[in-house]
Amino acid sequence: MQFQHMKKILDESELDNLRQRNEVSAVYYYKRDIPRLKGFLKELDKTAEYLKLYGVEVGFFDCGILHEAKEPKCNEHNAEFQIFTYRSNHVLLELGLETMFDVNSIMSNILQLVLIHDVPILQSVEERKEYENKYKGEKDILFTYQKAIGTFEHRIFMEVAFAYHDKFKFAVCTNKQAVQDLKDSSFDPTEKSIYVLRCKNWTQKDLKCPYFKYSKKYDLASLASFVKSLTYPKVFMIPSGGKEIPFYQDKGLPVGYFFYDKDSKDTVLSAASDTADAFFTNLGIVAVDIDNVSPEEKRELVIGGSFPAVAFHKINMEKPVFMEGDWGELPKIHQFFIEQLNRQDPYEFEGESRSGSDFITSEDMDEDGVEFSEQEQFGDDEIEEVETQDDAVAEAVYQSRRKLPQVDLIDALTDKTFPTTIKNKDLVFVLFYLPFDDKSMAFLYAYADASKEIESDPARPLTRVNCHDWTDVCGNEKINIYPTMRMYRNGKMLKDYKGLLDSQAVVTTVKLLNQSNPVNLADLTSIMDLMNGVLPNSKQVVTETVVMALFDKSHDKALKVFKNVASQLEDTMTFAYNDDGAARKIPDFKFTVPSIVVLRRSDILKPHVVYSGKIEVTDLKDFILKASIPSMPELTVEWFPALYRQQKPFVILFLDEYQESARVKKVIEDIVISGKFPMVQFVWMNADAKSVGRSVLNEYDKDSRVPEISYVDLKKGIVFNNKDEYPLEDTVSKWLTGVMNEKIEPSKVLEQGDWKPKKHGYDFLSLIDKQNERKKKKKHRNQEERTIEEQGVGFDQDGREIDVEEERAKAEAKNIDSQEDEVSCN
């Protein structure tokens, strides 16, 4: 049996390695043919490709005659009807084949297992309430009812849960009882539903969290976009929140502006808060303090006329649309936004407008029936700027929003044109993207630039599919990572692009795939031309790395292996071969026949490396990938991933433009040429005053000077700085030997860090204390009002006349006590 994506396990040691992984592994033990097995294995093989994205490895173990006695599972009764899952050599669950009938069911079952601690299955109201109470004051919860585990809808929910489980809590139920107390839950048992339980800012343990039901399209793109919108702030304040309005991220959420001055502040902010509840996830709310915005911001927002005012804006609109007439009641404002949303994009909004009752229920009241809005609970000054954008890619896309990508040279494919384009063109590049995904949009700009560079190509190979519009196309192509650039040749999928999301990298890939790869070097002239960077068709070589094979007619097996490797790497570098022994006829030629040579055109220290191992596909491919790295490259963003994958310590030479740097660089180059230290990777960085290299150097050595040599072991988190005033080859070599033999103490130990938000979070305890204090004050105020209404002015709640002088004396005494307490605290 042959598989494309599932690992075929050949022996017991390989099986043990798979079961001992720290991440989830799944193994099917083949014992005999059973009904529906062929179809199941085909679906399992497809699923294995997608599960790799979530760290899951799927294996197939053929028990056979040789393995049967050794592997216990092969002798286990009915093992052929199960998939066995493992983590760290422990069996997790046995999944029955009767519930694993297609990609969706396999994916969702195994993802449920991967996220078993993050996405529990809760089957009763009591379990759900316990889960709510656990995360009140911490995180919102997305809770779904599914007719069964293993459906397409369950898979979508699990994929979104995998992406956002660090920001929200997720849970699943298949028992309708678990949602019976939620509004709008009187649905048919075959229907799926998702509820958002807003527990993050809710702390009352005896009352359930405010909630609402997801009502948009049930596909991956729509649900992912919706969950992303849950991360936005309720009301964004200008100017205190900054200039970067978060709602314009992704596909650009429409924005409702509320403009206020000092006289109308309380009224407007209350209306803004209520509107944010009513249009949650459909409309972003921005409150603008016109007394404190700059003249430039006023011009940009087209602010004019009287205040307060309300306006609607979308990212593709030239200027906001203001609500006509005077400031009105809340229903009038909501109707204005409904009309604008329907006018702008009726398909996107579908006329939905949730009333405030979807979010402010009886649970939003205190025990005396007093309603508290979020604005009253926390106040503007306490809602700190914690939602500020800290995603560099999203920031770059947002800053570029006024200059849209020029995609006129990129054909936009639909469900009708996609199959015909793939079929009729020899070579097609398709960018599958989501318009609300920051990474997709960032790449779309580079993709557009690439289309201009190859504008002269009549084939126009670059195309695109908007997966938000054409979900069926992307679903059929099994696209679940965005952006994905997929290459097709002669009507069939070739491979997915794995290179840099950069315009020049895309152009290079197009040129590589447009030429025959490997290139046939038919004669001596072709071989010599290639050494000088020229192809047989007189075009320039487009890659820094060229792999050249020199064979004769007796090396047909080696040539077959070489062509196999070339086909796997054809989109990354140039391959060429000669198979008639012509290289033997070149006088004083440095390479013998047979040989495979990696030519590094920009590497002046070691311009070529000759392969000396067995000519087998895996070994040769690994060698080429490693040999393609220059012997001493500049450490850049482009090179870092490939260099880091080697898991070698770095020797970094920090340079500037002066003569001493040139001298020290020559010292390091001589060490590289000598080959004394193959276990380290030599690199250099520009360390001029304002460069990235100088920032890195300052991190490694606060007392740095340039040039400087640093030995950096990122795996161990240690740095050694060479402080020799006049480095020479022998002194640097001696220093490196001492470092590698652990005879020198590190100059710095790098801090053990992790990826945390750049901005601080809410101080919930402080907010809760202030909320409770406000409740007490409001209750006291309401009690006084009721007493006056019932007993009259000047009487207490028991109907006794108040002694004014006595009350004044009590108040003064209380004031003196509080002042003394304050002094003692200070």
Image: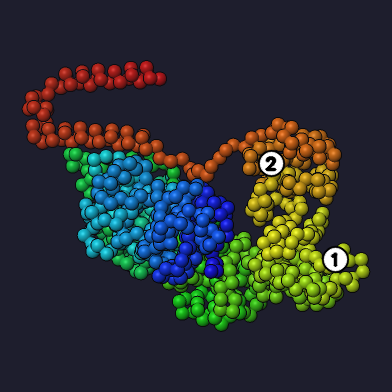
Rendered image quadrant of residue 803: top left
The answer for how far apart the CA atoms under marks 2 and 1 are is 38 Å
Front residue of this view, candidates 180 and 10: 10
Relative to 560, is 659 on the left or the right? right
Q: Which residue is drawn at 67% across and 69% down?
A: 564
Q: Residue 520, how many percent across, how many down?
A: 76, 75
The amino acid at mark 1 is: Thr
Work out whether 468 lies above or below 743: below
Quarter of the image that includes the C terminus: top left
Q: What element carries label 1?
A: loop
In the rendered structure, find residue 698 and report the number of the disc placed on it: none
Q: What element carries label 2?
A: strand
Please give the residue where the numbered disc 1 appears in the rendered image.
592
**Label 2 neighbourhood size at 10 Å, few (<14), some (14-19), many (20+)?**
many
Q: Taking the image as drawn, is residue 313 in sight?
A: no
Q: Taking the image as drawn, is residue 685 in sight?
A: yes
Q: Which residue is drawn at 84% across and 73% down?
A: 581
Front residue of this view, candidates 102 and 362: 102
Front residue of this view, candidates 24 and 237: 24
Q: Residue 418, how many percent across, how many down?
A: 50, 77
**Which comes sooner in the sequence, label 2 or label 1?**
1
Please give the residue where the numbered disc 2 appears in the rendered image.
712
Q: Residue 206, how many percent across, how many down?
A: 24, 40
Work out whether 231 lies above or below 217: above
Q: Which residue is drawn at 41% across and 58% down?
A: 77
The amino acid at mark 2 is: Val
